[in-house]
Amino acid sequence: MLAGCAIVALAVAAPVSVPAADRWALSVLGVALLCLGFCVRHEAAAFGAIGAALVLGWGAQLYLTEPLWFPALRLRPLDARDIGMMAILSLETALAITLFLRLGLASAFRHAAQRLGWRRMAVAAAVIFLSSAPVIGYLDRDAQGAWIAHLIVTSGLMAVHGILFTALFHVAPPLSGSHRLRPIGLAACASISALLLSALAFQTIPHVEDEVAYLFQARTFSQGALWAPVPPEPARAGLDYYLLEIGGDRWYSTTLPGWPAALALGLLLGVEWLLNPLLIGASVLLGHAVVRRMSNTETADRTAILMALSPWMLAAGASLMPHALALALSLLSWWLILRADERPGKSLPLLLLAGGSMGWIFSTRPLDGVILGGSTGLWLLLTARRDQGIRRALAYGAGCVAIGSLLLLYNAAMTGSPLTLPLSAYLDRHWSPGANAFGFGADIGPPGKWGALDLWRGHGPVEAAINTLNLIFSLQFELFGWPIGSLLPILGFLLWADRRSGFDRAMMVLLAAVIGVMSLYWFAESYYFGPRYWFPAALPVLYLSARGIGTLLDRLDVNQDGRVSSGLWFLCATGLLVFLPWRAVMKYHEYGDFHTAYRDAQEAGLFGDAVVVFEKAGNEGSAIMLNDPFLRDGPILIMAGPETDDAALSRAFPGREIVHFSPDWQSTDPSGRNRPRYVSRNANR
């Protein structure tokens, strides 16, 4: 174990001249040695050796995977490092064949087929096969044959990993019995992990244009206003940015107000970077409490483990996007409803608060609010006694309306119509009327082409099906970060659960509703941190996965001793210690060409209160995000352009020095190959 710790420390302390991908690969070797050392100390050397081989194989596969929008395996090596990784995968395959023969795993698979049924196993295999490589990246370049080749190779590697994982159940485990962590410990783990990811990979700054707009709006709200005055004419071109609008005498962000209102509180306290990590931790606690009441403690524990260690969840908690807030509010609403059932005398205030939580979601992500709030209201009506159902639903609905209607008031103040979102008005002006609408039509979608993010002009059923398949791949890849894929647990429930409770069916309906409704949107959003438009279904996915693990164990008649605990914790550890750091290094760090060069210069005191005319390096949001919307406090950062006039800027901002700044920064490929890393949507907008 000391050797493993030393190698991980060496990977962290390695000089910057060593490519980030290679430092990460070195850390994977350290994790493998830690696994081996831990198991040897607990008299489970065979488990440790097989686990270490699986860690190295998973690391080699990730090293060969293109990390950005549509992750795909490199089938042709680029250099000697790739050849080395392919050699590791070859050795893992040889080990899998050896273990398959020596441990008699053929009989184990026959036993599984008898217990599970060949037909259902074939269905599960087909789903996993089709979701093992993203389809959109290949359709965009008319390379369907390459997609099929990648499906075969990637699913084959998943099978190899699966054999090694199965072998772990046929050797002595390092753990004995079940090992339960208290929910508060899992919540702390989730918050700390998200906080570390936010600080080290996301660098507590935006990485997509939406986050810049959210920060602008939060800063406006924190100063007690809905909009800021229009910037002086000489500065407007250099302050122009996606989702920021100038209308009449107003300068404002067109994003929804629910998340910026929460973010404004963080800004006032100087801890806006802490809000989402805390919300993810709170979601673990609330998710456990909800599932424990609706199912049982064992399933609640599994759900909390999966939630706390899910790379998908942790990435949402490390970002500056609103999804963690919407998840925490939905779980808070459900918990309050269940508490209302336990305290009949105080049920109405709790139901009002539950409705208010859903109303806040409506002000944050309106469609999420409609799906979650509407399904929750329906649940209240269907599960309560007839004499109480309407009364309870009315109290809940009153809370929804009281808070949700604030969005209508906000719309009226910003656009003149309570039913017109500022975002809708903005996109109608800059794209075309109705281009960002839900549904099918020839004129839906952005003008021009957003590359592979929007395959064809308009939106129809075929594109909806392709988008959904691509999002299923994204969930398979991002949800748990396991070498055997992330879908097997939920497939275990959907295909093999014989007895389904009312809560099971409710979670299935909610999952289907989210997938179905989101398929009507032209944009299959998976390029940032997985299928984030499916985040309203996070608890259904995680709960049904936890149920699926229990279902498979029961179906296979597995003795739930230390092997089960060891296997589950091993998978979760690979997701947390191998997959998530790979995501952090290869994707999230400086993703979107957002960087801290401007912030570092400001914190070093280079700008003072000057008007800083900066040269664009990466995404200009890296500088724009630092501005006070009212252009009063601190420096004013304006992007240089052909119309920039220093004399006019001096007249517009009297008393401020005009400073020109060109940051010493350039986009780098973490693999050290100096390939183009990121193509902004700005190029196609």
Image (cartoon, helix red, strand yellow):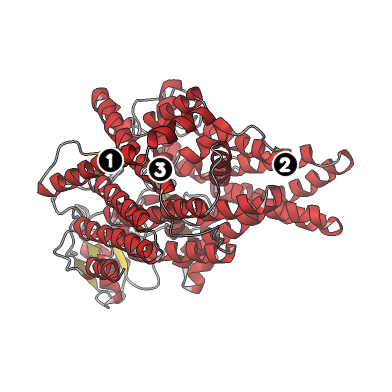
**Residue at 32% of width from left, 60% of height from top?**
36
In the rendered image, the residue lying farthest to the left is 80
Q: Which residue is mark 3?
A: 166
Depth check: give the residue in front, 406 or 418. 406
**Residue at 29% of width from left, 33% of height from top?**
137
- Mark 2 secondary-structure assignment: helix
Look at discs 2 and 3 and give the one toward the viewer: 3
Query: Who comes first in sequence, dot 1 or dot 3?
Result: 1
For residue 258, side relative to residue 621 (left or right): right
- The numbered disc on residue 45 is none
Instruction: Specify the quadrant that holds the C terminus.
Output: top left
Instruction: Specify the quadrant that holds the N terminus.
Output: bottom left
Q: Which residue is mark 2?
A: 377
Q: Which residue is mark 1?
A: 98
Identify whether 655 is placed above or below 202: below
Query: Who comes first in sequence, dot 1 or dot 2?
Result: 1
Marks 2 and 3, how far apart at CA: 43 Å
Depth check: give the residue in front, 296 or 387. 296
Depth check: give the residue in front, 117 or 492. 117
